[in-house]
Image (cartoon, helix red, strand yellow):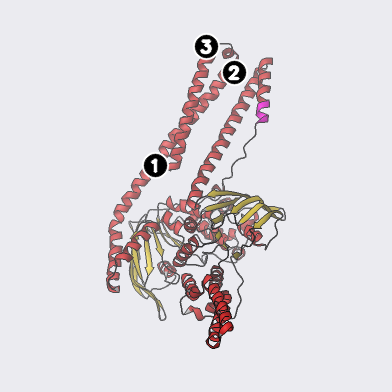
Amino acid sequence: MILSCQNISKQFGETAILNGCSFHIEDHEKAAIVGINGAGKTTLLRIIVGELPPDDGIVTLSKGKTLGYLSQQPEIESENTIYDELLSVKQDLIDLEHKIRSAELQMKSAQGDELERLMSVYSSLTHQFEMGNGYAYQSELTGVLKGLGFTEEDFSKKIATLSGGQKTRVALGKLLLLNPDIILLDEPTNHLDMTSITWLETYLMNYKGAVLIVSHDRYFLDRVAQKIIEIDQTKATTFIGNYTDYAAKKEVLRVSMWNAYMNQQREIKHQEAVIEKLRSFNREKSIKRAESREKLLNKMETIDKPTEAAADMKLHLTPRILSGNDVLTVDGLSKSFGPLTLFRDIRIDIKRGEHVAIIGSNGTGKTTILKIINGLLDADAGTLRTGANVQIGYYDQEHHVLHPDKTLFEEISDEYPTLTNTEIRNTLAAFLFTGEDVFKQIKSLSGGERGRVSLAKLMLSEANFLILDEPTNHLDIMSKEILEDALNSYEGTVLYVSHDRYFINRTAHRILELDHQTLTGYLGNYDYYLEKKQEKELSDESSADTKNVENARNIAKDDSQSKSDWKNRKEMQAKRRKLENDLKKTEDAIEALETRNDELDTLMASPEICTDVAELTKLSREKETNLKELDLLYEQWEVLQTDL
């Protein structure tokens, strides 16, 4: 074990953030901390590294072990270039190298005992140099810089001239080169594109030390994490496995806790009804029986109602009218900014009901495509046509659709003047803005809060074609899952740009990759795209012109197969409707049997039946049969619910 946290508690003012949180990290283990925004994940990391004192509890790092920490906004101020800043991490190896060169020079002129001494020193120095990976430190440094998205032209840039995101990448590179025994990373993928995230995943998976990560990137957590530590309502719970394993176990646990709570509530209501009925008979024996039941009821250890955080924010996207089958046709689109050509002669054909994701490295022009489609930028060449009855709803990652000086209430009421005050408040409440929150100004909100306001406006738009630019940025995992569920049940068409691979996997029917100024189409989600891309890279040895032809064929193939894809989705929708009908029938059967059991309890408690042994036995057997049938129905309900 390299790190132990025992009963960590922390509160700010009257608000408890962490309460009795305990977990440990083994040597070489890769673990992740998850939880909604504000749950206390960053606070916990800061307590572990000693930046914050806990109110209670102990953090123990194994003796002799080193710890490295990357915060969300690391402070890095330097006059060095990017390369020299990372090279400073290897100063001990540079000093060793100088000593080795010096010993080599001295040995040339030394003799006898002095030569023997110098050779011994030289042997010791070279051994230290080799053990520190000295012969490969320069290539290691270059590999880390390139892996984090820096080109060789960037190496000579001064740290002072970099953006906040670039400085974070430099700080991450320095930390990785330090090779501490345990690395703590707070949202390390925030400023990385897909290529860099994939590189970091591989690096951390092969890292010899332990890793503890806070991240909302579920695909990243699936690849790297072996253990998930969930912070929920101030408590820490450990789940073995990656994020998908955690999500499955969490859902089983949630259903189990909810069922236990509901079963107990039914039992309490049933007992209360029986007690009330027994008292109503107003006889000595029935009153004693009622009192006996009441004592048992009072001794019952009640189960707290499980929290349903996902139900707090409700997102329902409903098109007002149905669009035509051809939603968007783009042909020969090109765009440059000065000497920089982003893309040329690209075409896109989107049909009604499709969910299409545009992916690619930072700076390739993905957002530019969306802005051109929305009329916010002019194309240099090409045509763009929307189909019949297409109504666009646009989600802008920079939230330009919001007015900074307006309050949340004004933002909604000015856009939708027919809504009543109650309807506006209810809409904002669905996105977790309640009470006086609705009178906050947009400019005072965090990035995540602005995202929720934009989603609220999008929900009210009743558009049938959603165009979304990085919709999951600044959202926690819970909010992402709510958005995913809303999009998956949305009957309109969706085109979006995202680097969230888990989100793409759950919501995309088709992927368009923007690379080398052109679009390549892949039918399916992100995992399918990866599979096909790897096959293509292995088999494609033709010229750049041949690649462009093949890209065009891929896109044409996607379009020709869209009808088949549409049919498959319709079949899935029909299957879902059948499951919903079966679930409703099961729930009705459960309700009927429970109602009958209540009637049986009432009958068996009645004076007429109490003295009739034959009738009492008959009713008791009927209830026993009902209970067995209820057990089967509950199991059937859980299976149907899981399938849905």
Q: Residue at x 55, y 11 (%)?
A: 613
* Spatial separation of the CA atoms under disc 2 and disc 1: 42 Å
Q: Contact (CB < 8 A) between labels 2 and 1?
A: no
Circle 1 SS class: helix
Of label 2 and label 3, which has the lower sequence position? 2
Kind of residue at badge 3: Ala
Secondary structure under the numbered disc 2 in the rendered image: helix
Circle 2 crowding by C-alpha within 10 Å: few under 14, some 14–19, many from 20 = many
Pointer 2 residue: 605
> Disc 2 or disc 1, which is closer to the eye?
2
What percent of the width, then of the height, locates residue 459? Answer: 49, 55
Residue 335 figure quarter: bottom left
**In the displayed structure, does residue 548 sit left or right of residue 311?**
left
Q: Relative to residue 168, is residue 522 depicted above or below?
A: above
Amino acid type indicated by mark 1: Arg
Counting from the top left corner in percent of width and height, residue 601 is at: 56, 21
Determine the CA span between mark 2 and mark 3.
Answer: 14 Å
Badge 3 local density, few (<14 within 10 Å), some, or many (20+)?
few
Measure the C-alpha gap from mark 3 to mark 1: 46 Å
Residue 159 visible here: no
x, y (%) of residue 62? 63, 58
**Residue placed under numbered mark 1 in the picture:** 577
SS at mark 3 in the image: helix
Which of 520/276 is in front?
520
Does the magenta run of residues contain 627?
Answer: no
Q: At label 2, which amino acid type do we have?
A: Ala
Residue 583, image x and y in percent? 44, 37
- The segment highlighted magenta reads 295-300
Between marks 2 and 3 in the image, the one whose residue lies nearer the viewer: 3
- Residue at numbered disc 3: 614
Query: In front: 628, or 498?
Result: 628
**For the stretch drawn in magenta, what is the main secondary structure?**
helix
